[in-house]
Image: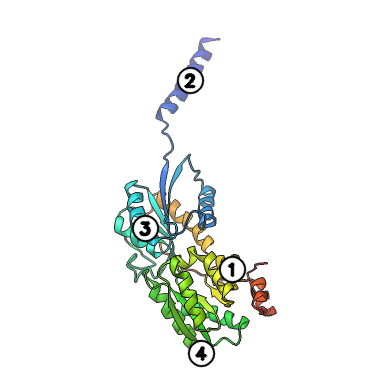
Amino acid sequence: MSRRLARAAMVVVLAFAAAGADAQPAKVHRVGYLIVASAEEQRHLTRAFEDAMRELGYVEGRNVNYDRRFAEGRPERLPALAAELVALRPDVIVTGANPVIDSIRKATTTIPVVMTTGRDAVAAGYVESYARPGGNITGLVTDPSPEAIGKDLEIFREIVPRARRVALLWNPVPSGAATYRAAAEAAAAAAGIALHVVELRAREALDRAFAEIARERVDGVWVLPDPLAYTGRATVVRLVKEHRLPSVFWQREFVDEGGLVSYGSNVAQNFRRTASYVDRILRGARPGDLPVEQPTRFELVVNPIAAAALGLSIPASLMQRADDVVR
């Protein structure tokens, strides 16, 4: 090898060596994840979020690690789980509904928090406004407008036109819950439907709640969005079937379990959208500068099998408008 070639080869070797010395290992981000439901009840939503993160380039074990915590449907466990998660000092925490946000908020005011299904976030004190949240919390809310809530009853009455009295299953405990009840009551009054309100404060109280509903001889049951009802949705659907109660829900997962009809925002899409917030925060954005998203699209899901079991039929016009039909 000539002296000139040897010198050139040495330059290349030194350049690679310098590059290797300067290269730093890729940062491994830490993302906390706290939910009321069990891992199994939440599996499709967790997958939706983590699939979206993967599409954005975040691969678990390579450049992101997840600290997942599940309260197994027991909200009383949330404060301890929140404290445990905050002690790990994640770069950002992804939360579910308001009971989770409340617990995280008490544990930290500095770690960025991304809501997936927040409710009435301004009134709850999570953000200053949806346009400019301020503070350490941002993300997505599922606030229903009175018109959207009223659509639940409108669709329900297309299937059960004789309905005049409906039970409203409602959890008064979480912050923001009163907004949902007020919207439901306004919609029922406008539709000329009397509501019998039944409180649900624990999953263990579902059987008792439905026994009360059955005694009232109502024409159906309306289940408002709530993490307790959601995590206990298999039990809710079993009970509406046992008591032969036509039912209307805000979330499609109840219909997937065998419920009659739902109209509301798609929660799985919320979890997918959450990944974009996490990505921006990991890239340096401040949560207080990221506007909170409200639902703009609602989906109608119907279950003709559940209708037939109740001696009902879903009108053809409703079937044609449905975004999905569970068979």
The residue that mark 2 highlights is 13
The reply to whether the C-beta atoms of the residues labelled 1 and 2 are less than 8 Å apart is no
- Say which quarter of the image contains residue 313: bottom right
Percent coordinates x, y for residue 203 in the rendering: 44, 66
- Which residue of the protein is positioned furthest toward the bottom in this rendering? 192
Q: Residue at x 51, y 13 (%)?
A: 6
Q: Residues within 10 Å of mark 2 (few under 14, many from 20)?
A: few
The residue that mark 1 highlights is 255
Is 303 situated above or below 153?
A: above
Residue type, label 2: Val
- Say which quarter of the image contains residue 20: top left
Q: On the rendered structure, is 217 left or right of 205?
A: right
Q: CA distance from mark 1 to mark 2?
A: 64 Å
Q: On the rendered structure, is 84 left or right of 194?
A: left
The residue that mark 3 highlights is 78
Q: CA distance from mark 4 to mark 2?
A: 83 Å
Local secondary structure at mark 4 = loop
* Residue in front for this viewpoint, 239 or 26: 239
Residue type, label 1: Val
The reply to whether the C-beta atoms of the residues labelled 3 and 2 are less than 8 Å apart is no
Q: Who comes first in sequence, dot 1 or dot 2?
A: 2
Q: Residue at x 41, y 33 (%)?
A: 24
Is 15 situated above or below 209?
A: above
Q: Which mark is residue 173?
A: none
Q: On the rendered structure, is 103 left or right of 9?
A: left
Local secondary structure at mark 2 = helix
Local secondary structure at mark 3 = helix
Q: Who comes first in sequence, dot 4 or dot 2?
A: 2
Q: Which mark is residue 192?
A: 4
Percent coordinates x, y for residue 36 in the rendering: 43, 59
